[in-house]
Amino acid sequence: MLSRLSLASLIFLCMSTGRLQAQTDQPQDFNFIFMTDIHLEPGRRAPEGFRQAIDTANKLNADFVLTGGDLVADALGASHGRADSLYLLYRDGLKAFTMPVYNTIGNHELWGIYRSSGADTTHPDYGYGMYRRYFGDTYYSFDHKGWHFIILNSITDAGDRYLGYIDSTQLEWIKHDLEQIEVGTPVILCTHIPLISAYNQLSKGSTAPNDSSMVVSNSRDVLLMLYRHNLKLVLQGHHHIIEALSFQNKVTFLTGGAVSAYWWGGPREGMEEGFMLIKLRNGEVDWEYVDFGWEAGGH
């Protein structure tokens, strides 16, 4: 498992004063599952692999599943019929869960923004439309046992490409959402494209820059809204790796591997197909990566 990195940050110096007023409800202990980058498709035995992940999850003591985006293999450059069939495959697959599922939108859920799709930009399913038709709002929040969960849409359609960005409308919504909770309430944020990541620096060199397809370019705008709040965990996807960055022992940025690993083609840089079991105890966060035993190839 990855070791934790202690990194100084002015943002999180402010965060260290998070509990500014008493909570009305103490957070309870529970587990939940974080499944990201499923990339479901009819080929590569992906439905079989996803079902194996679901069966494994159902045996764990978890209250719900939170997905991290890239639920389907690819709608970006697909025809409408192909994209819709992938959404149907994923929606029907969810029926095997014995617990609630909360979804997060990923870049591969945007239908038709690649020119190769031939999509009509006025079609109601274009861009975010197909996701909304199947799963509703692309960003939202909910409360569970004294914890507040915020699910973000970190994908911006930039015309034949996507960018990691939180638009002004969503930023205003985050501000309003946070005004509805006590400052001391523990908060968990979920985003497909990471807010913070050192993956490029690890793989390319310590001075390698990130770009806006790899991380959310205005993540600081999001984090500054949370500096007075008790942010405990940011769950991230997109990179198909396990990465844990801890700041001031107050907040952990956890990139959750991938259910599909190397897009159902085997391990990704040694990481097997799997998902995160998140354990919340006494207001603190612990986690483990669950390898559900699926192997690429075979019949």
Image (cartoon, grey):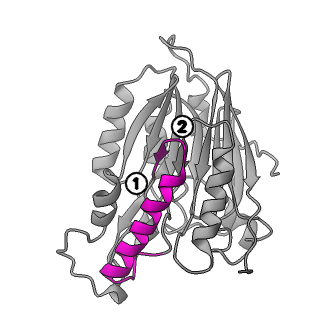
Q: Where residue 166 sits in the image (x, y, percent)?
A: 39, 54
Q: Where residue 116 sits in the image (x, y, percent)?
A: 36, 89
In the image: residue 229, left or right of residue 82:
right
Q: Badge 1 local density, few (<14 within 10 Å), some, or many (20+)?
A: many
In the image: residue 106, left or right of residue 60:
left
Element marked by disc 1: loop
Residue bounds of the magenta highlight: 74-103
Along the line of sight, the residue nearer the viewer: 17 or 26: 26
- Compare marks 1 and 2 and give the one earlier in the sequence: 1
Which residue is at 56% across, 24% downward?
18
Q: Badge 2 local density, few (<14 within 10 Å), some, or many (20+)?
A: many
Q: Label 1: which residue?
A: 153
Q: Is residue 162 visible?
A: yes
Q: Where residue 110 sits in the image (x, y, percent)?
A: 37, 69
In reply to whether residue 218 is colored magenta, the answer given is no
Element marked by disc 2: strand
Q: Is residue 206 visible?
A: no
In reply to whether residue 87 is colored magenta, the answer given is yes
Amino acid tagged 2: Ile
Quarter of the rendering occupied by the C terminus: bottom right
Residue 49 figure quarter: bottom right
Amino acid tagged 1: Asn
Along the line of sight, the residue nearer the viewer: 142 or 155: 142
Q: Calculate the distance from the C-alpha at mark 1 to the C-alpha at mark 2.
A: 15 Å
Q: Label 2: which residue?
A: 188
Which residue is at 58% across, 57% downward?
36
Callout count = 2
Which residue is at 42% across, 34% downward?
142
